[in-house]
Image (tube, helix red, strand yellow):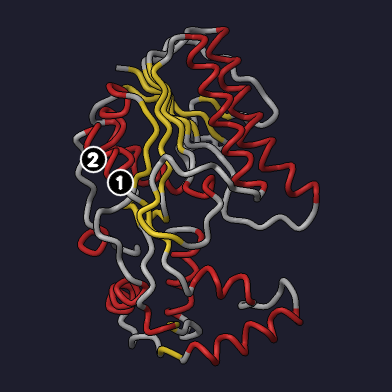
Amino acid sequence: MKLLFTGASGFLGNNTLLILQEKYDIKTIGLTSKDNFNINLAVEIPHLTEQFDIVLHAAGKAHSVPKTDAESQIFYDVNLQGTKNLCAALEKSEIPKAFIFISTVAVYGLDYGEDITENHPLNGTTPYALSKIQTEHFLIDWCNTHNVKLSIIRPSLIAGPNPPGNLGAMIQGIKSRKYFSIRGGKVRKSVLMVHDIAILVPLLAEKGGIYNVCDSEQPTFRDLEKLISIQLGKSLPISIPYWITQLLAKVGDLIGDKSPINSSKLDKISHSLTFSNEKARRVLGWEPLNVLRNFKIQ
């Protein structure tokens, strides 16, 4: 079967492409010379020269906080317009049988909560979340119109070698000894092994649907701190009292965006945020990899 993979040169692609190549004949769209179609989907409609059975659409913008309207617009250009350009290209070549879109749990707009299901309202308000919500809605309509089996997965924090985002920041913080544990590291977060994306592709292509995807075991920050510290050969980060972090956060509020901690950031890292994977396990017959047994930081 032929699979078109967008964003294959990114973190997700680097960790899943070889696995997927064992099952599929793959062509990629991306920004590197290694991609079969080397174009910027945000501004171009690719010319596809063959038919694909499955599209895995992972290209997107994340892991940054916009400071200007122009920076905010980039999320819509890449995530929404890029998807529209991809679909326009598919209409000109051949419509696939299945389309798999990598969305995010950010669409729910939650800073804390436990076992959040797919039925939760999409209340995200950041440019990242809104661009993903609008892309989901566009794809639902497009796939219905063209009789394409659509899968939307909403991954939690994704773990894998050299991860970006918050996990990458935790690793760098522990490596430089500038990371401190808060509330004894008891807060839980949903995490997904990046390799699970490759495992999910054939299941999604067959079934379709919208799913949260994460490990069944919701690790605590302390679990992750221990795992990372052992792999780095570093001592376990010191846990500081919550009242001290509150004072630091108030100082950070005065400093502004350059502060490593403020009240908003403290609120996010001092409360658990977990998601339910029950639907994905039940409908797809998928059993996720255990993050604490499989996460290698490099």
Q: Quadrant of the C terminus?
A: bottom left
Give the label on residue 27, or none: none
| In the image, farthest residue toward the right | 69
At x 41% / y 46%, what residue is drawn? 155
Task: Identify the residue under disc 2.
Answer: 281
Q: Is residue 109 depicted above or below 261 in this figure?
A: above
Q: Position of residue 2 (x, y in %)?
A: 34, 18
Task: Identify the residue under disc 1.
Answer: 277
Asked where in the image residue 225 lies, by quadrant, the reply is: bottom left
Q: Is residue 125 depicted above or below 203 in this figure?
A: below
Q: Position of residue 238 (x, y in %)?
A: 40, 90
Looking at the picture, which amino acid does disc 2 mark? Arg
Asked where in the image residue 246 lies, by quadrant, the reply is: bottom right
Looking at the picture, which amino acid does disc 1 mark? Asn
151 left or right, relative to 201: right
At x 55% / y 9%, what residue is drawn? 91
Asked where in the image residue 131 lies, by quadrant, the reply is: top right
At x 44% / y 9%, what residue is drawn? 147
At x 33% / y 73%, what residue is drawn? 228
